[in-house]
Amino acid sequence: MFEAVAFYLFAFLTITMFYITVTTSQALYALSALAAGMIFISAFFFILGADFLGAVQIIVYTGAVMALYAFGMMFFDTTREVKENHGNQYIVVGLGTLAAILVVVIFAVPMVSTNMQAFYPMTEGAGNTEMVGMVLFTKYLVPFEVAALMLLVAMVAGIVLAGKKMDLSLTLMNAEEIQEIEDQKNKKVLS
Amino acid sequence: MMEIGLNHYLVLSTILFTIGLIGVMRRKNLLLLFFATEILLNAVNVGFAAISHYYGDLTGQMFAFFVIAIAASELAVGLGLLIVWHKRHGTIDLDTMTSMRG
């Protein structure tokens, strides 16, 4: 009963928030609605018993991703209205619905048709976080390390692209200007 | 109606995925396009968590974790590139990115 009420409430809230995100013409409204939608999504994870995933969702999305978006929006002119692609709305909605249903069917039909057995079944008497730790650090250790390396690469890329010394950027200069800066550095060292 | 099953969550995931796809198709501003891709990834995460719960299997939750990691790194690199583009051209509209036309 309570599960059903919570599901329908949060489904309504999530769909509303994401609908605002994709339809509003103000970038700031889109950002706030997206942050709210992310928190409501984590409610589904808590309902489904995936407590650790819900906590990670709140921390990563509303803590890191939204803060990063907020910092990124400081660089762009977000106060003006956003121009939008006003093509045939029916084609857009129809294509979107069709593609989404296709994706879900492609994933769901093999599971329904074959009698699927749990690959890594839940351990009895262990909390969700414990179970996640047991599976993640035994069966999925290599993907976990690869994901860590990928996050490191992304961090380095982010710092190089948008890091300090905002007035001069190596990605925007041609070879002579970079050579000039190098020469100035060498002069300082020599003198 | 009162018993929430796997189908409810799959339908919800489909609806959210549709909203994200509509956003991807009608947005011109690249920042708002990124928002739409985040919605797509979250819709898939809901589906993964639901399947993980109803089949008693933790693989779905593992995939959801890796999807979150990929979303975070995609965002870091994407926003860095977007800032470089904005510094060079002063705009982040998709229509201006036509330098590779034949």
Image (cartoon, coloured by chain):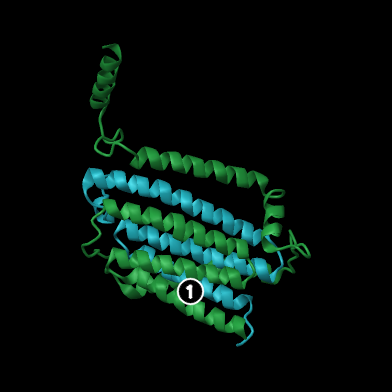
Residue identified by numbered label 1: B15
Relative to residue B12, is residue A70 drawn left or right? Answer: left
Seen as rendered, the residue at the extreme right is A124
A36 or B82, which is in the foreground? Answer: A36
Spot occupied by residue B94 in the image (x, y as percentages of width and height): 28, 55
Relative to residue B72, is residue A80 drawn left or right? Answer: left
Q: Amino acid at mark 1?
A: Ile
- The answer to which quarter of the image holds residue B22 is bottom left
**Quadrant of the rendering where the N terminus of chain A is positioned:** bottom right
Residue A162 sits above or below residue A42 on the image: above
Residue A60 in view: yes
Spot occupied by residue A89 in the image (x, y as percentages of width and height): 32, 73
Spot occupied by residue B101 in the image (x, y as percentages of width and height): 27, 47
Residue B101 in view: no
Seen as rendered, the residue at the extreme front is A191
Residue B97 sits above or below residue A24 on the image: above
Relative to residue A69, is residue A122 drawn left or right? Answer: right
Residue at image location 61% in from the left, 66% down from the top: B49
- The answer to which quarter of the image holds residue A25 is bottom left
Spot occupied by residue A12 in the image (x, y as percentages of width and height): 47, 79
Residue at image location 22% in from the left, 46% down from the top: B89
Seen as rendered, the residue at the extreme bottom is B1
**Quadrant of the rendering where the C terminus of chain A is positioned:** top left
Q: Colour of chain B?
A: cyan
Residue B97 sits above or below residue A45 on the image: above
B54 or B95, which is in the foreground? Answer: B54
Q: Colour of chain A?
A: green
Looking at the rendered structure, the secondary structure element under dot 1 is helix
- The numbered mark 1 sits on a residue in which chain? B
